[in-house]
Image: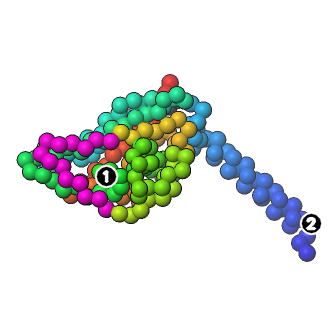
Amino acid sequence: MPSLRRRSFVLALASLTGCVTDARQNSPQDRPMEDVHYTVSTTVRPSSDSELQLSVRTLDSDITPTSPARISFRLHNAGSSPTPIESGVPAPFGVLYGYRDTERILLWTDAYERSQYVQVEDEMVVGVDEVGRQTTLEPDESLERTYSIPYGTPNLYEGRHTVNGTGGRDLSFDGINYRIVLNITRKE
C-alpha cells in the first residue's frame, strides 16, 4: 500500500501538470481563435514556367461568424496540346488541408459532398478512398475550384499553414511540386 507522503506527491504532480497544460493552451499563439475575427492571404511557390499553371487567389480574406474566407485554386493549360492531369478526388486538387505544426485545418468545398469517394459528416471529411483520377485539360482550358475556411473551423490558429492534399502530399502538376502557404492573422 502506498504511503500517504507518496500519494500526496503524486496528487501534487498531477495538479502541477494540469496547470502547465492550461497555461500553454492559454498562450496567444497556441489558442484557437474562435473568439476573434481573422484574415487569410496566400502565397504560391514556384511560379511555374510549365505550360500547366497553378494559381491561387484569395476571394474573401476575412473569416467572421457570418462569412468564411474563400480561396480559388485554378489550373490552366497555357500550352498548345491537351495535357493529362492525375490527381486525388475530387479532381483536380483532391481534399486539401492547411498544416501548422502537428495540426491541420480542412479547406472546405461542396465538391466533397458530391464525390462518391469522399465520406463527409457535418462538413468534415471523415474518409477518402485512395483512387487516382485522370482529367485532360485542353489548350487554353482551366479547372477552378473554390475552397472555404469557415469561422469555428477546428484547429484554426494564427500563423502559417502549408496547404497539402490527402495524406499530406504536396500539390504536384506536370512534375512541379507547389508550395502553397495560407497566412492567417488576427484581424484588428
Pointer 1 residue: 91
Residue 143 located within the stretch drawn in magenta: yes
From which residue to which does the magenta span run?
132-145
Taking the spot 15% from the left edge, 53% from the top edge, the residue there is 83
Residue found at the far left of this picture: 80
Name the amino acid type tagged 2. Answer: Leu
Name the amino acid type tagged 1. Answer: Ala
The quadrant in which residue 29 appears is top right
Q: Could you say which is closer to the camera, residue 125 or residue 167?
A: 125
| Residue 152 visible | yes
| Dot label at residue 4 | 2
| Residue 161 visible | no
| Dot label at residue 71 | none
Badge 1 marks a residue whose secondary structure is: loop
Taking the spot 69% from the left edge, 46% from the top edge, the residue there is 22
Give the crowd class for mark 1: few <14, some 14-19, many >=20 residues within 10 Å: some
- Left or right: 55 in relation to 2: left
Q: Between marks 1 and 2, how big is the CA–CA gap?
A: 63 Å
Residue 100 % position (x, y) = 46, 49
